[in-house]
Image (cartoon, rainbow, N blue to C red):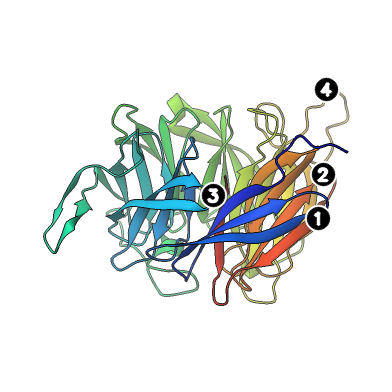
């Protein structure tokens, strides 16, 4: 069989505890293989990675002292140049970017940093007195998620890391770039913001309280058509579907699905990630969601749901009785996932969708294959000793 697809597909992986970025190479033929292609030095551990739409810039959270976010230029899969850093008020849990701004959220606070649309580097710098050849980046805008009714909780519990389990954890943009969604585990809500497309600055929209009192919104991911967003609930192991109104800043919950098997105690898990597949353009057929076991030995899960053409969970079907169960697969992961078990969809090759799955318990990175019926782990590699895989982005 002759394959017109590339012979290898590359993706980057950050870690929770080592100052490196890993470039991994996945080859689907003649039999699937995964290997470490390159190790790039970093200024600290990168728990979250965001690749720009052009794929020429990488932005990362950095668990440095003081905490920061980092901008890189991706010249090739093995040539990654640091463009600069920007200090954040608290440890960042997540970073995302438009063409002119980077958005960070973590615990009690968040920031907006201006970037050069041509280079992707941070702008708004001033000389750092202690280091004449470096520069400090001033935030374009500072955000606070702490309300007058109470302070940010930070009790040092599992994965609290400066309040990330009890505060804002992520920030994602709508497909048109005009709305920012911040998932806040501690305040059990989604914060919405209107984005000024010319400057990247934010105007508060509304606080969308979760459907259940114990949900803990962790990540919000938009459908490419911009009519729905999916909210991953860390504590309840649910994914909720919200319809978007009022130019993106108002949300209404319309669906909710459980992402662990019935009968299991949600208290034994902490859900991690939700993503749409990247096949079929703006009409992805599948929604992926992953959970972690809260303790070593408690394995996690990857769930796959069918999506209709508009983005609701379900199968387009005009006949009666109702459409089949939209839950297509529930696959148990080989480990708890540690702090990760983050699923990141990648390329579709000969009708098979491939995803990267990261594990910090053993430092594993796996490639999963979904053929529309079942999930298989087709390849894996272990990072260097002591490196806990965090998240992946496909180049």
Q: Tell me whether the residue at label 2 lies in contact with that at label 1, contact meaning CB atoms closer than 8 angstroms.
A: yes
Residue on which the image places disc 4: 318
Instruction: Of the two numbered discs 2 and 3 on the same chain, state the one appearing first in sequence.
Output: 3
Question: Which residue is tagged 1?
Answer: 376
CA distance for labels 3 and 4: 46 Å
For the residue labelled by badge 1, is the local secondary structure a helix, a strand or a loop? strand
Q: Is mark 4 on a helix, strand or loop?
A: loop
> What percent of the width, then of the height, locates residue 372?
82, 42
Question: Looking at the image, do the residues carrying marks 2 and 3 touch, with CB atoms under 8 Å apart?
Answer: no
Which quadrant of the view contains residue 268?
A: bottom right
Q: Which of pointers 3 and 1 indicates the residue nearer the eye?
A: 3
**Residue hosting label 3:** 77
Mark 2 highlights which residue? Answer: 371
Marks 1 and 4, how far apart in space? 31 Å
Q: Where is residue 111 in the image (x, y as percent from the top left)?
A: 30, 48
**Disc 3 secondary structure class:** loop
């Amino acid at each position: 069989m002759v394959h017109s697809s590339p012979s290898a597909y590359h993706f980057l992986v950050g870690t929770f505890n080592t100052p490196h970025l890993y470039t991994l190479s996945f080859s689907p033929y003649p039999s699937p293989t995964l290997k470490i292609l390159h190790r790039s030095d970093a200024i600290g551990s990168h728990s979250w990675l965001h690749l720009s739409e052009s794929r020429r810039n990488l932005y990362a959270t950095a668990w440095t002292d003081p905490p920061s976010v980092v901008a890189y230029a991706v010249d090739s899969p093995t040539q990654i140049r640091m463009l600069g850093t920007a200090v954040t008020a608290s440890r960042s849990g997540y970073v995302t970017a438009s063409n002119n701004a980077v958005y960070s959220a973590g615990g009690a606070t968040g920031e907006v940093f201006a970037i050069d649309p041509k280079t992707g580097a941070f702008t708004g710098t001033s000389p750092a007195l202690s280091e004449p050849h470096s520069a400090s980046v001033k935030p374009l805008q500072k955000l606070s998620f702490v309300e007058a009714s109470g302070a940010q909780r930070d009790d040092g519990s599992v994965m609290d890391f400066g309040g990330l389990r009890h505060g804002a954890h992520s920030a994602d943009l709508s497909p048109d770039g005009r709305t920012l969604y911040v998932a806040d585990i501690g305040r059990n809500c989604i914060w919405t913001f209107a984005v000024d497309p010319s400057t990247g600055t934010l105007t508060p929209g509304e606080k969308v309280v979760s459907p259940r009192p114990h949900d803990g919104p962790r990540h919000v991911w938009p459908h490419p058509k911009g009519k729905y967003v999916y909210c991953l609930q860390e504590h309840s192991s649910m994914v909720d579907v919200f319809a978007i109104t009022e130019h993106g800043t108002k949300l209404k919950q319309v669906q909710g699905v459980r992402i662990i098997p019935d009968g299991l105690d949600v208290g034994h898990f902490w859900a991690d990630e939700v993503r749409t597949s990247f096949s079929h353009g703006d009409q992805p057929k599948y929604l992926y969601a992953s959970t972690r076991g809260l303790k070593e030995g408690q394995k996690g899960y990857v769930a796959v749901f069918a999506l209709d053409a508009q983005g609701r969970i379900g199968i387009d079907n005009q006949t009666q009785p109702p459409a089949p169960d939209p839950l297509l697969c529930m696959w148990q992961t080989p480990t708890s996932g540690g702090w990760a078990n983050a699923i990141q969809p990648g390329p579709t090759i000969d009708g098979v969708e491939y995803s990267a799955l990261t594990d910090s318990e053993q430092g594993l990175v796996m490639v999963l294959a979904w053929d529309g019926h079942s999930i298989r782990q087709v390849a894996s590699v272990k990072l260097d000793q002591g490196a806990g895989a965090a998240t992946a982005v496909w180049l």
